[in-house]
Image (cartoon, rainbow, N blue to C red):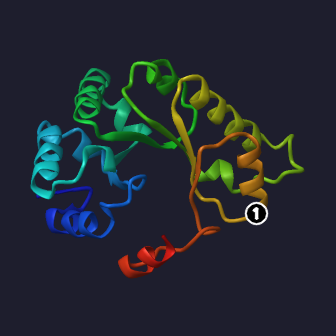
Amino acid sequence: MEIGYISVDNFKTINDSFGHYEDLYVSVNIAPQEFQSPDFVDKVKEILLETEIEPKSLELEITERATMENISYTIDVLKELKNLGVKIAIDDFSISYSLLSYLKEFAIHTLKVDQSFIRELTLDDIDNKNAAIAETIITIGYNLDLKVTAEGVERREQLEFLKARGCDTLQGYYFSRTVDKDSAIKLL
């Protein structure tokens, strides 16, 4: 059994290594076809039962595209996952008009700003269209009581720009490259 290409055994290892950290959670990228699978919620329930991971310690990252394939299915599945206590993030969020019209109905916790908007950010470049879009996404998240994560932060200017605008979480190579379990524990 696996979700997002992470097996039950890997989830157990993650939980054993990091489960005692109160504010940490595992984010798992979910492929659109996996999300649209009729047994997706059952798979998530089974993973939670078998691994004893706290639902609040699991965040499922679902792309904008996956959410738009079948709106009524998406609304139902997101509500079920929220009722389980699992966190949901819309990955690669980019202010698609069609998604905006449904965003208030989706039971989600986080918007993840697509890194294509982060790549060109600088403190001095207020007129930059990417800056305007990133700032708009942060504002949308704030107004909908959602967390906002900026992906692809690689430079101090990006960090300063996003912090100044109230972005909740930043991720990217500025902080760390991908690391193994032992290195991650040392970072904590």
Query: Does residue 58 show up?
Result: no
Q: Position of residue 169 (x, y in %)?
A: 57, 49
Give the residue displayed 43% in from the left and 52% down from the top. 23
Extreme-right residue of the structure: 124
- Residue 84, quarter of picture: top left
Residue at image position (15%, 52%) is 47
- Residue with the mark numbered 1: 156
Q: Is residue 108 visible?
A: yes
Q: How many marks?
A: 1
Q: Residues within 10 Å of mark 1 (few under 14, many from 20)?
A: some
Q: Is residue 111 left or right of residue 118?
A: left
Q: Quadrant of the N terminus?
A: bottom left
Q: Nearer the viewer, residue 179 or 77?
A: 179
Find residue 72 and report its image quarter. Answer: top left
Q: Position of residue 135 (x, y in %)?
A: 71, 37
Q: Secondary structure at mark 1?
A: helix
Decide: is 16 above or below 119: below
Q: Residue at x 22, y 63 (%)?
A: 11
Quarter assignment of residue 130: top right
